[in-house]
Image (spheres, rainbow, N blue to C red):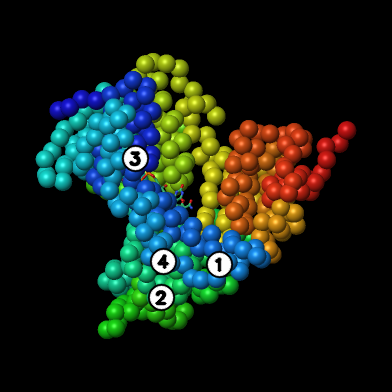
């Protein structure tokens, strides 16, 4: 039995950050990882997906500026794109990340971690060796999530791609069908379209359905303009591979889509099935519900007494995004230290040990073309919450900076204002390169900057950020 103050199961971006904060606070920490240190994000998600999206975005950006367009006339060099992707994923080798853990004084065990009882974890190494661990202070579950594969007749037999195969491909199919119009489906449709693949995107609903409605309209229009077939309001009924090796998908209206591969991107499930949750009164395979300090809700179960179990990142289902998970990790690592030292815990709204932004200011950039950037709530969510609010809309094409940025720039911004407090509580932008403008809205929301004060935050001319001024003009000058 080896004893540490903190045991972290899962060394994705989130687990790594919990370990870093707890260690920096003077606690002894061990991290357990069954695959690669760096997790899904580094090797099969954020980094490779953005690496394969960026060349298409760079080409389109040049093609939208007369003068530059004439200099960019060819197709993407897909081999070079994939080579650049491989450099971002370090050829799926995590030695630099393992070295980093070592450098910060965190111990590392490669193997599958399972909880065996209160504060106890058993680790089975790839060679079958078992190490038993005990935590003085906390066990933190940061095991992330995996792609959901629906139980649709024939689908498993066609060996569908998940996001792992889509982001890690070494050869590009001529035809790709994409099932699911969420973030993964929309981004991968965009990337493969840029490679010259014939893309068919099948979605039950509009695309990126939880966002403002104008988002789907813009992304669907641009995918179609780029040559993709986008089928909305359709689901998959049956799949098979024919003798020629093609994937034949039959949809609910009996229409048929034929492709070389099918990517299934219909959401995520928590990686908690084989984690020993049953040994502490929790349900295997469930998301781990946490309080504001990321401590797993005990539901009164005596085995969780003392609040020793934490869950950070995708596995707690608060916001399945790397940056939100890392934000939780900083709070969790610090609060474990505070509790260990009997220091004050700041768990109130916006306290340093509370993950308040998970409810009020989740940020997300979807790297479709046009990009989508969102923070806080949508108009529909404000309505649902019964908030006294006002919706401000502005056409980004009418901003001087955007017309300089790209010929025929198309885009839209919507802000949601809490009228009782006169502060912005949500913003969504669609348009080329809007991702880099999101942080200004995030600061306005988290800082609860009054509309009246925002008039003094003067955007530089001629930048796209002048949309701020246009939104304020739409809202109206403060009355004397
Ligand atoms: C295609 C795709 C693109 C994405 N792009 C973005 C993006 O651009 N921006 C963004 O913010 N988010 C993006 N995401 C989401 C992002 O990948 C996740 O939110 C993030 O990886 C969550 O981090 P995590 O540390 O919680 O989990 P993970 O990254 O999943 O890491 C969990 C780790 O735990 C390990 N593990 C699991 N079970 C055990 C066990 N029992 N014992 C030991 N180890 C275990 C796993 O091997 C894994 O390494 C994307 C997701 C996908 C699928
Ligand atoms: N740029 C980014 O920030 C980024 C990129 C990729 C992924 N991610 C994260 O990864 C997570 C997973 O992405 P995702 O796209 O897999 O999930 P998602 O939840 O974004 O979208 C899943 C889509 O599939 C649909 N769907 C569900 N069941 C279906 C079924 N049986 N048949 C057809 N459609 C079905 C849903 O209606 C939804 O539109 C997201 O929550 C996101 O936060 C983020």
Give the quarter the ligand 2 occupies: bottom left
- How many residues crowd mark 3 within 10 Å: few (<14), some (14–19), many (20+)? many
- Residue 19 vs residue 362: left or right? left
Quadrant placement of the C terminus: top right
Name the element at disc 2.
strand
Mark 4 or mark 1, which is nearer to you? 1
Mark 4 and 1 residues: CB-CB less than 8 Å, in contact? Answer: no
- Looking at the image, tell me whether mark 4 or mark 3 is earlier in sequence order: 4
User: Which residue is under mark 4?
Assistant: 78
- Residue 370 vs residue 313: left or right? right
Residue 408 at x, y = what percent?
69, 64
**In the image, farthest residue toward the top:** 342
Quadrant placement of the N terminus: top left
Residue 193 at x, y = what percent?
48, 69
Give residue 448's mark: none
Depth check, front residue: 63 or 10: 63
Mark 4 and 3 residues: CB-CB less than 8 Å, in contact? Answer: no
């Amino acid at each position: 039995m080896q004893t540490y103050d903190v045991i972290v199961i899962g060394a994705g971006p989130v687990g790594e950050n919990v370990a870093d904060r707890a260690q920096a606070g003077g606690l002894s920490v061990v991290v357990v990882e069954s695959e690669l240190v760096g997790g899904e994000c580094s090797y099969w998600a954020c980094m490779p997906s953005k690496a394969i999206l960026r060349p298409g975005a760079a080409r389109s950006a040049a093609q939208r500026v007369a003068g530059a367009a004439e200099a960019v006339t060819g197709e993407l060099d897909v081999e070079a794109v994939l080579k650049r992707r491989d450099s971002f994923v370090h050829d799926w080798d995590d030695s630099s990340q393992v070295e980093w853990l070592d450098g910060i004084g965190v111990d590392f065990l490669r193997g599958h971690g399972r909880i065996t009882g209160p504060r106890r974890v058993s680790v089975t190494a790839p060679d079958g060796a078992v190490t038993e661990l005990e935590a003085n202070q906390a066990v933190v579950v940061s095991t992330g999530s995996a792609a959901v594969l629906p139980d649709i007749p024939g689908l498993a037999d066609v060996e569908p791609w998940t996001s792992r195969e889509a982001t890690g491909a070494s050869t590009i199919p001529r035809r790709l069908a994409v099932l699911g119009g969420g973030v993964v489906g929309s981004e991968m449709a965009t990337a493969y379209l840029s490679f010259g693949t014939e893309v068919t995107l099948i979605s039950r609903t509009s695309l990126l359905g939880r966002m403002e409605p104008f988002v789907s309209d813009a992304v669907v229009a641009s995918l179609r303009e780029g040559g993709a077939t986008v089928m909305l309001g359709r689901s998959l009924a049956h799949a098979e591979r024919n003798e020629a090796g093609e994937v034949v998908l039959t949809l609910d209206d009996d229409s048929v889509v034929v492709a070389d591969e099918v990517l299934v991107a219909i959401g995520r499930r928590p990686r908690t099935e084989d984690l020993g949750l049953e040994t502490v009164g929790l349900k295997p395979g469930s998301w781990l519900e946490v309080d504001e300090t990321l401590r797993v809700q005990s539901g009164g179960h005596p085995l969780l007494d003392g609040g020793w179990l934490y869950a950070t990142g995708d596995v707690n289902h608060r916001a399945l995004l790397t940056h939100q998970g890392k934000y939780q990790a900083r709070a969790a690592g610090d609060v474990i230290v505070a509790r260990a030292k009997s220091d004050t815990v700041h768990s109130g709204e916006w306290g340093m040990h509370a993950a308040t932004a998970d409810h009020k200011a989740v940020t997300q950039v979807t790297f479709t073309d046009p990009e989508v950037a969102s923070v806080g709530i949508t108009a529909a969510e404000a309505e649902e919450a019964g908030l006294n609010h006002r919706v401000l809309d502005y056409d980004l094409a009418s901003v001087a900076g955007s017309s300089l940025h790209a010929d025929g720039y198309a885009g839209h911004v919507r802000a949601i204002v809490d009228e009782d407090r006169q502060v912005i509580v949500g913003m969504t932008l669609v348009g080329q390169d809007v991702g880099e403008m999101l942080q200004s809205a995030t600061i306005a929301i988290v800082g609860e900057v009054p509309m009246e004060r925002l008039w003094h935050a003067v955007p530089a001319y001629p930048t796209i950020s002048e949309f701020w001024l246009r939104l304020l003009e739409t809202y109206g000058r403060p009355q004397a």
